[in-house]
Image (tube, rainbow, N blue to C red):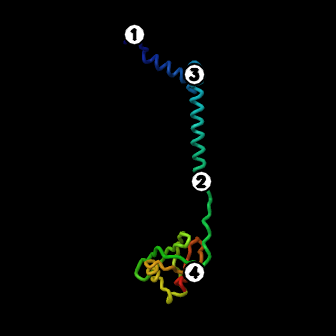
């Protein structure tokens, strides 16, 4: 053992004595300005983080209601058609004049002989607008019951 070192048992006793008598980790000379500033900085940092977490949660959990659907009928350009098999169309997407898009489910059409649902694919290719008469179901989905050429 060299002459300027403290035996390990004395170092441990000194350290544990410091912890027992000083649970806040205050310096042995009492509270100093540096010690106080470090504690205030920690509390301020936690407060800032808490503030941002609060507002992030408030922003994402805000109860916003979707805008009500426009009045039926509506005109627009077909941008997507969902067809699981040839001649059968289940849904389509319409782009309105303002650039917004609406998703429609094809219900029982009252004019299926004048405008078969498969004709929507041709309108998608040519970008000719269509007129859609629809109703809103309980879940908020839009169900088309009449399709027409918008030029009529």
Q: With 145 as the anchor, is 124 left or right in this view?
A: left
Counting from the top left corner in percent of width and height, residue 141 is at: 56, 72
Q: Earlier in the sequence, mark 2 or mark 1?
A: 1
**Nearest to viewer (mark 3 / mark 4):** 4
Residue that mark 3 sits on: 21
Q: Do the residues labelled 3 and 2 touch (CB within 8 Å)?
A: no
> Closer to the camera, 59 or 94?
94
Residue that mark 2 sits on: 59
> Closer to the camera, 14 or 108?
108
Q: Which of marks 3 and 4 is nearer the N terminus?
A: 3
- Work out how far the residue at label 2 is from the one at label 1, CA to CA, in angstroms: 64 Å
- Work out how far the residue at label 3 is from the one at label 1, CA to CA, in angstroms: 29 Å
Residue that mark 1 sits on: 3
Counting from the top left corner in percent of width and height, residue 98 is at: 56, 70
Q: Do the residues labelled 3 and 4 touch (CB within 8 Å)?
A: no
Counting from the top left corner in percent of width and height, residue 136 is at: 59, 75
Residue that mark 4 sits on: 133
- Work out how far the residue at label 3 is from the one at label 2, CA to CA, in angstroms: 45 Å
Q: Are marks 2 and 1 in contact (CB under 8 Å)?
A: no
Q: Are marks 4 and 2 in contact (CB under 8 Å)?
A: no
> Closer to the camera, 146 or 3?
146
**Nearest to viewer (mark 4 / mark 1):** 4
Element marked by disc 4: strand
Q: Which of marks 4 and 2 is nearer the N terminus?
A: 2
Residue at x-position 53% and y-position 70%: 101
Element marked by disc 1: loop
Packing grade of label 3 (10 A; few <14, some 14-19, many >=20) is few
- Quadrant of the snapshot with the N terminus: top left
Element marked by disc 2: helix
**Nearest to viewer (mark 3 / mark 2):** 2
- Work out how far the residue at label 4 is from the one at label 2, CA to CA, in angstroms: 36 Å
């Amino acid at each position: 053992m060299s002459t300027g070192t403290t035996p390990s048992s004395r170092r441990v006793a000194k350290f544990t004595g410091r912890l027992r008598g000083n649970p806040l980790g205050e310096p042995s000379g009492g509270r100093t300005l540096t010690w106080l500033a470090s504690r205030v900085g920690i509390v301020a940092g936690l407060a800032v983080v808490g503030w941002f977490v609060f507002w992030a949660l408030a922003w994402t959990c805000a109860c916003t209601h979707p805008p009500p659907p426009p009045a039926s009928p509506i005109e627009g350009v077909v941008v997507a058609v969902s067809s699981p098999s040839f001649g059968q169309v289940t849904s389509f997407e319409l782009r309105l004049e303002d650039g917004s898009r609406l998703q429609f489910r094809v219900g029982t059409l009252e004019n299926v002989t004048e405008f078969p649902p498969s004709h929507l694919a041709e309108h998608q290719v040519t970008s000719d607008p269509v007129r859609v008469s629809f109703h809103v179901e309980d879940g908020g989905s839009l169900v088309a019951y009449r399709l027409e050429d918008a030029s009529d």
